[in-house]
Amino acid sequence: MKQLLLTIAVLFYSTFAWGIDLIVPASSGGTYHKFATIIKKDLEAKGIEVKLIVSGNCVIGKKQWNDSKAAIMINSEATNAVKECTVEITEQNYVHNFFTAGWVIVSKTNTMGEKMGVVSYMKHTVAELDVKPVPYKNTTEVKAAFLAGEIDSGFLTTGRASSIEDKIERFSSKERHQLFIEPEGKETIEIYLNGFSTSLPENIQIKDLSLNSNFLEIKFNDGASTKIAIVDIFKEFSNINDVKQIEKIKWDSSFKDQNSFKFKENLFETDEMYKALINFYQYGFVIFKNVPTKNNFIINFANSIGSVRRTNFGEFFNVKSKPNPNDLAYTSLPLAPHTDNPYRNPVPCIQMLHCIENEVTGGLSTLVDGYTVSEKLKKDFPKYYKILTEVKIRFQFIDESVILEDWAEMIQLDENSNFKQVRFSPRLDFVPLIDKEKLELFYSARKKISELYNSKNYRIEFKLLPGDLLMMDNYRLLHGRTTYDANEGNRFLQGCYIDYDSTEGRLKHLKRKFNY
């Protein structure tokens, strides 16, 4: 097996401010991105102006690295194994690898500190570097020392990952411990066991690896051996469980199937729930029928899938007409198509509405597929689509106790320029100061997409009955309501939010359970 490049070390800095491009050669929202935000925050706290650039992939990242005069880039052995992504790591551009996972940071800036943490079992010296070595027992101590400000950076070159012994000692009551099989590179067949042959004693190491049609067999020099099924390895590294692989199905006003599923005891562990979640990801919504109309039951329902996302409206909220409301939802007035909480970062992903009572003749629920409308705009009005995906506007909510705001595009795209999210709430958005020509184009685009959202061609209407629970994708769908007479009777709904990890986790669990 190849020896991992596991050099740990941390950024650090002069006291004066300068501009740095912090390049993430990976997708938005992933581990690289999260790690980069930590670096950015720490650099900015030290007076350094940082521009975070999420490239989407390592090929683009390398190009951006080459084009920038002052750049910091997060790289890894895996990406460096790809020819088009390879960045030569030298004493001059090497900065740090904060986690023991084969990551390294290369820089065109002078960011090395004066003191460097060194683990006690380090095999290579740093005498050639102008730093003061400070000994530590392990990588955890190095990271802690960095966070405490004792050292400016850390350095580890032993090719070791996190210790399996730590798992055994800390969780001695466990009968089994997880190991992770990871590829060496894109164009190779070699793999390594992350978390296994790490800080094992030198007299106990992997002696031999053999691969047959069914198993990967691992032998150690102390006589011990283990086998791992090849099918489990492929299952672990395939994307078959990725909900991104579920194709979105566009729909408009002609869509009649309301994707309804009957609630029953133990629903969340059934094949029916799996099918309901598939429908949710395909169409952006699903309706559960015959849900108990108990007050606050929606919390039990939501927590059976994942965890409720608490907002300024509380853990859940009551949707009914009331005096002195702080939101139009709490009136009997009509609600135009909109997305909820566009002023939050992140926006709640999934909204649930549970109908407890509905005695009025109006008050129909309305849904619009923002994905369908966005694709329509992209095809027929490309200039409008382009500016709505580029100009960030401010979404803001203000009441007596809180001010919430976030800047975002009305149509957000992912790292591959595909549809990710829509934000639309005309009462809550504010356009930034931009040049006259661009502003006119933006307002024309905003008017057009509003017309499409409010068109009968894209809207479905239906009445939520007592016991109906609507679960909808707040990143994709716009929802609203027709007017009703509050004096006619009661219309009482309860709502809450959950995030994608809840439904994704449940779907993967059920996929495994029913062997799909």
Image (spheres, grey):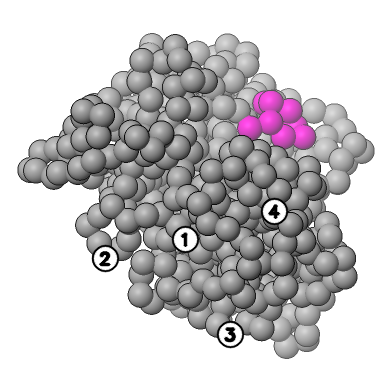
What residue is shown at x 59% (from left), y 20% (from top)?
299
Mark 1 vs mark 4, CA separation in Å = 25 Å
Q: Could you tell me which secondary element the residue under label 1 belongs to?
A: strand
- Disc 3 marks a residue whose amino acid type is Asp
The amino acid at mark 2 is Glu
Frontmost residue, 501 versus 25 = 25
| Residue on which the image places disc 2 | 187
Q: CA distance from mark 3 to mark 4?
A: 34 Å
Q: Which residue is mark 3?
A: 67
Give the total of numbered labels.
Answer: 4
- Of 430 and 47, nearer the camera is 47
- First in sequence, mark 3 or 4: give its number: 3
Q: Which residues are magenta?
A: 309-316
Residues tagged 3 and 2 counted as in contact (Cβ below 8 A): no
Q: Which element is circle 4 on?
A: strand
Three-letter amino acid code at the position of disc 1? Ser
Question: Toward which corner of the image does residue 91 lie, by quadrant?
Answer: bottom right
| Mark in front: 3 vs 4 | 4
Of the image marks 3 and 2, the number of the one nearer the N terminus: 3
Q: Is residue 135 above or below residue 379?
A: above
Reading the image, the residue beneath label 1 is: 76
